[in-house]
């Protein structure tokens, strides 16, 4: 299934960036944008939030799931002071959990619905696709930052 291959591929691509040297981790993809280190911390946190969402959609369909504010998370959780070693392990293990759920539920239960607090009615398939697209979008930001 394409989504599973996409999730696996973005995991492999993302993990290599956690090991960049400090001088590269501080690069940004644009003026006032997050550094690579901040992006990796954000991807880790977003992965955990989205993994929780997917489990809730499967277990409690039609529930209301709340948006989170990534800028607040970055500020209050102090992304620049958090360990990338720990974040890498969290990202990797949670992504494995997402992949397992996609393998077991994407095809047959992708129709399950939930209400997102900001975007309204969505499906499990929508949310799993979002996980891939969100990660892939930030991979592009990292690649831009490294090209500068």
Image (cartoon, rainbow, N blue to C red):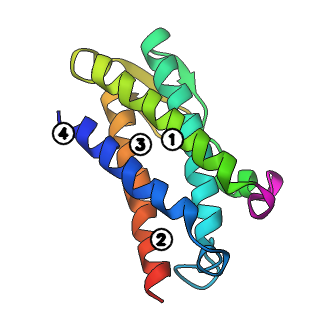
Q: Which mark is residue 131?
A: 3
Task: Write down the residue under mark 1.
Answer: 92
In which quadrant will I find the N terminus? top left
* Mark 2 → mark 1, Cα distance in angstroms: 18 Å
- Tell me which residue sits at (60%, 85%) in the image: 31
Q: Which residues are magenta?
A: 75-82
* Mark 2 → mark 3, Cα distance in angstroms: 17 Å
Q: Which of pointers 3 and 1 indicates the residue nearer the eye?
A: 1
Q: Which mark is residue 109?
A: none
Q: Position of residue 16 (x, y in %)?
A: 46, 60
* Mark 4 → mark 3, Cα distance in angstroms: 13 Å
Residue 124 falls in image quadrant: top left
Q: Nearer the viewer, residue 23 or 40?
A: 23
Task: Write down the residue under mark 2.
Answer: 142
Label 4 crowd bin: few (<14), some (14–19), many (20+), radius 10 Å: few
Evaluate if marks 3 and 1 touch, with contact meaning CB atoms under 8 Å apart: no
N-terminal label among 1 and 4: 4
Evaluate if marks 2 and 3 touch, with contact meaning CB atoms under 8 Å apart: no
N-terminal label among 2 and 3: 3
Task: Write down the residue under mark 4.
Answer: 2
Evaluate if marks 4 and 3 touch, with contact meaning CB atoms under 8 Å apart: no
Q: Is residue 23 left or right of residue 51?
A: right
Q: Position of residue 54 (x, y in %)?
A: 46, 25
Q: Is residue 22 left or right of residue 60?
A: right
Q: Position of residue 114 (x, y in %)?
A: 44, 22
N-terminal label among 2 and 1: 1
What kind of secondary structure does the magenta stretch mostly adopt?
helix
N-terminal label among 4 and 3: 4
Q: SS class of the residue under badge 2?
A: helix
């Amino acid at each position: 299934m394409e989504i599973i291959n996409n999730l696996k591929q973005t995991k492999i691509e993302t993990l290599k960036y956690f090991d960049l040297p400090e001088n590269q981790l501080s690069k940004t993809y644009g003026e006032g944008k997050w550094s690579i280190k901040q992006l990796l911390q954000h991807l880790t946190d977003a992965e955990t939030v989205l993994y929780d969402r997917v489990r809730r959609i499967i277990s409690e369909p039609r529930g209301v799931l709340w948006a989170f504010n990534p800028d607040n998370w970055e500020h209050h959780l102090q992304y620049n002071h958090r360990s990338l070693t720990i974040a890498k392990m969290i990202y990797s293990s949670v992504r494995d959990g997402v992949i397992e759920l996609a393998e077991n539920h994407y095809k047959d239960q992708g129709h399950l619905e939930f209400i997102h607090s900001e975007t309204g009615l969505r499906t499990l398939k929508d949310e799993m696709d979002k996980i891939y697209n969100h990660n892939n979008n930030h991979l592009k930001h990292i690649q831009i930052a490294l090209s500068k």
